[in-house]
Image (cartoon, rainbow, N blue to C red):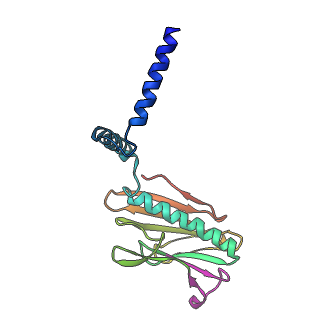
Amino acid sequence: MRQKNLSLVFYNFLIQRQQKANPNAGMSLIEIMVVIALTALLAALAAPAVTFGNNPLRDSSNRIAASFKWARARAMAETSAVRIRPISNTEFVMERAARCTEADPANWTVISDRVEKDGQLVNEDLSLDNPAQLIAATATINGTTTNSTANWNLCFNSRGTVHQNQNLVLTFRDMDANKQRTMEVFPGGAVDLGDIS
């Protein structure tokens, strides 16, 4: 019985003390320092996991592959032809027309978004980050193979397949690190990125 009374007395003491506490009181300096230290510790542990932007070859080739997939999806969604062709060895453009066989350049409409990068306008998601460059493009159309980094184009028709059953292999290289990566686009429209070597 005496133990119950002591518990009740202690409980009443805590309630009275809580009621006397200042409701406008803030955090102590020690509490703030502990929160800052824990935040710094978590940031230090998370920093090595952040790798985006550290590898221009990987980041650029991933963006280009995603753009090829987007071009295919857009061709099917809009029941039109969407092609990607090079402007230089570091930049490509995405265009749309009624059919892949459209020969008149005036009938192709540029559908790439333009953004400013390093002080100049480039096609968003279709430009390679410096020092990555396109060093080889091998196109196989109906058994005939051509190698040209400047004169290829890849056109997706409204069914999402590549025009003329073309198979395209692009090779990108990081000119500083001397590493390269290949990307292959199959006639059915699938895009495969190889490992960086």
Question: On screen, 61 above or below 121?
Answer: above
Residue 178 locus on image (x, y percent): 34, 57
User: Can I make out residue 153 in this image?
Assistant: no
Residue 184 counted in the magenta span: no
User: Can I make out residue 89 in this image?
Assistant: yes
Residue 93 locus on image (x, y percent): 50, 77
Question: On screen, 141 above or below 95?
Answer: above
Residue 97 counted in the magenta span: yes
The furthest residue to the top? 1
Write the start and end of the magenta stretch as one range.
93-110
Residue 22 locus on image (x, y percent): 37, 41
Residue at image x 39%, y 44%? 46
**Left or right of 71: which side holds 35?**
left
Residue at image x 36%, y 78%? 120
Task: Please identify the quarter of the rendering in which residue 60 is found.
Answer: bottom left
Task: Please identify the quarter of the rendering in which residue 109 is found.
Answer: bottom right
